[in-house]
Image (cartoon, rainbow, N blue to C red):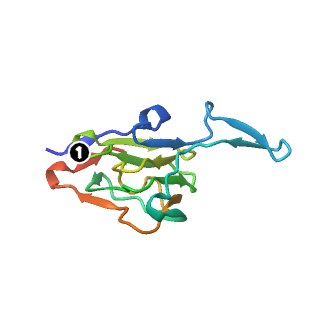
Amino acid sequence: MTRRLVPKPLTAAAFAPHGDVIEAAEGAERRRINEGHTTRFHDLARLELTREGGRPLVSIFRSEPPPRPITIRLMERHPLSSQAFFPLSGRPYLVVVGGQGELNTGRIEAFTAAPHQGVNYAPGTWHHYSLALEGVSDFLVIDRAGPGDDLDEIRLAPKDQIVIEV
């Protein structure tokens, strides 16, 4: 039987086991800079990109919304690094995560991210690729370039696939 998930709103507390929520939130450390004309929301994500000779890589991913209902058939992780996504198109998007260690499809969770929220997946965190919801969407992505194998993918067996109800 196919498991069905209804996404929860993305919050820092709910997402903490998987990484960081990147947003200008009330609780963020704030610093006034640039002669007082700018507020810096400081140190919002624990980027880990230099293990085994890696270096930071900045890209833009353009994602098309998948057909509905959204079926999760593939999960990935980056064992050597974090991976940060920040939306650029002003649209909500879907975040699907499955914890660390061996993938347990029973632990997969789904979150709806608001247009002002980014995510930073901790190293080794199982996640689905970016899932646009309301139209083609761009994401600023900060991840790792360099030597070593930093991508594991698992294609889910049909009995383990998950349908996201959005």
The one nearer the camera, 118 or 121, is: 121
Residue visible at 36% across and 42% down in the picture: 110
Which class describes the residues within 10 Å of circle 1: few (<14), some (14-19), or many (20+)? some
Answer left or right for 73 relative to 137: left
Q: Which residue in the rendered view is the most extreme toward the bottom?
A: 147
Residue 97 in picture, x, y percent from top left: 35, 46
In the rendered image, the quadrant that contains the N terminus is top left
The one nearer the camera, 82 or 9, is: 82
Residue 113 in picture, x, y percent from top left: 48, 44
Residue visible at 24% across and 47% down in the picture: 102
Residue visible at 28% across and 53% down in the picture: 72
Answer left or right for 120 relative to 6: right
Residue position for label 1: 105
Location of residue 16 (image quadrant): top left
The amino acid type, in three-letter code, at marker 1 is Thr
Residue 58 in picture, x, y percent from top left: 56, 63
Answer left or right for 100 relative to 132: left
* Number of marks present in the image shown: 1
Residue 138 visible in rendering: no
Residue 117 in picture, x, y percent from top left: 54, 44
Q: Which residue in the rendered view is the most extreme toward the front?
A: 52
Residue 110 visible in rendering: yes
The one nearer the camera, 73 or 166, is: 73
